Image (spheres, helix red, strand yellow):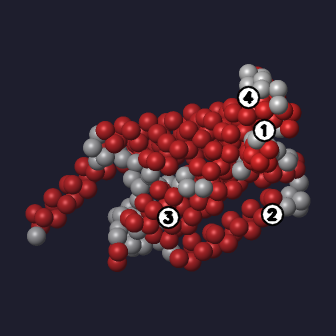
Amino acid sequence: MEYLKPVLLQVLSPQCYDEFFINFNFLHVECLKAAISKGLGLGIIAGSVLVKVPQILKLFNAKSGEGINLTAIFMELFAISANMAYSYRNEFPFSSWGEGFFLAVQTALVAALVLLYGSGPGKGKNAGKSAAGGRSGSAVSALSFLACFSAGLALMLSPLAPMQLLWLFQASIVPIIVVSKMIQAVANYRQGSTGQLSAVTIFLLTGGAAARIFTSIQETGDSMMILTYVVSTFVNCIIAAQVIYYWNSGKSGKGGASKKKVAAKAKKEK
């Protein structure tokens, strides 16, 4: 087992390694909990590398940010970044917050694509053009946003940002998460569909938030972080339920019905 020891010590503490592989005490409760928590944390981080890729690809292929509320995305991005900075500066184990980096990068890309393509439906040559009720896209807006986000994140991670400010940011995450998800939920309800939201991404985020409740209890004991993930799980479940509901409704709903009417009207006019 010695050749595997360096790998196993990434998940187990030296004491727990001895309990499991020297004393063969595989039922040691505290070590089992620690190993499960560490394994879950590393699994969440590995999954987070690709968790929003389906969403990014869906936006890229559609050349449209239709159905995605940009305000909700900005609020979610702030919550992810603040949580990551708070955890990093508190020197919590990387396994308890590491997915925050990958989620922040991918969420920033989602926001940039919505800014680039706009919120109206469109493909190919029509991408970026404003549709009825939609917002036109802009490459300048997308690039400016990415530059500002990168600078802001670097500042929060540096010693220049006081810990009291980061604590306030962390405390604000709970209401921000609730408001951002409710904005998206209301937008889904009004449209009668979930637009370009990726079902895979939503379900992965919901499962990841639920698993983080356990890992936060085990690895940080920080009540603010635990509450954050409890609330995040609840509101993500609401969006996931909408994805299932509108999927079972034929993915059309009010939005789909209105598009069909517009298409039918256009045919009659021809």
Question: x, y percentage for residue 96?
Answer: 74, 43
Identify the residue at horizontal 39%, vertical 53% (top origin).
Answer: 195
Q: Residues within 10 Å of mark 4 (few under 14, many from 20)?
A: some
Q: Earlier in the sequence, mark 4 or mark 1?
A: 1
Image quadrant in which the N terminus is located: top right
The part of the image, by quadrant, that contains residue 260 is: bottom left
- Residue type at tag 4: Lys
Identify the residue at horizontal 44%, vertical 52% (top origin).
Answer: 197
Q: Is residue 177 left or right of residue 19?
A: left
Q: Earlier in the sequence, mark 2 or mark 3?
A: 3
Q: Is residue 160 left or right of residue 94?
A: right
In this rendering, does residue 211 appear at all?
yes
- Residue type at tag 2: Leu
Question: x, y percentage for residue 24?
Answer: 77, 26
Name the residue that disc number 4 marks. Answer: 33
Vertical position of residue 130 compared to residue 220: above or below: below
Report the disc number at residue 155.
2
Kindly report which numbered mark, 4 or 1, lies closer to the viewer in this rendering: 1
Q: Earlier in the sequence, mark 2 or mark 4?
A: 4
Query: In this figure, what is the number of numbered marks?
Result: 4
Q: CA distance from mark 4 to mark 1?
A: 10 Å
- Residue type at tag 1: Leu
Identify the residue at horizontal 35%, vertical 74% (top origin).
Answer: 124
Contact between labelled residues 4 and 2, with CB atoms less than 8 Å apart: no
Name the residue that disc number 3 marks. Answer: 114
- Residue type at tag 3: Val
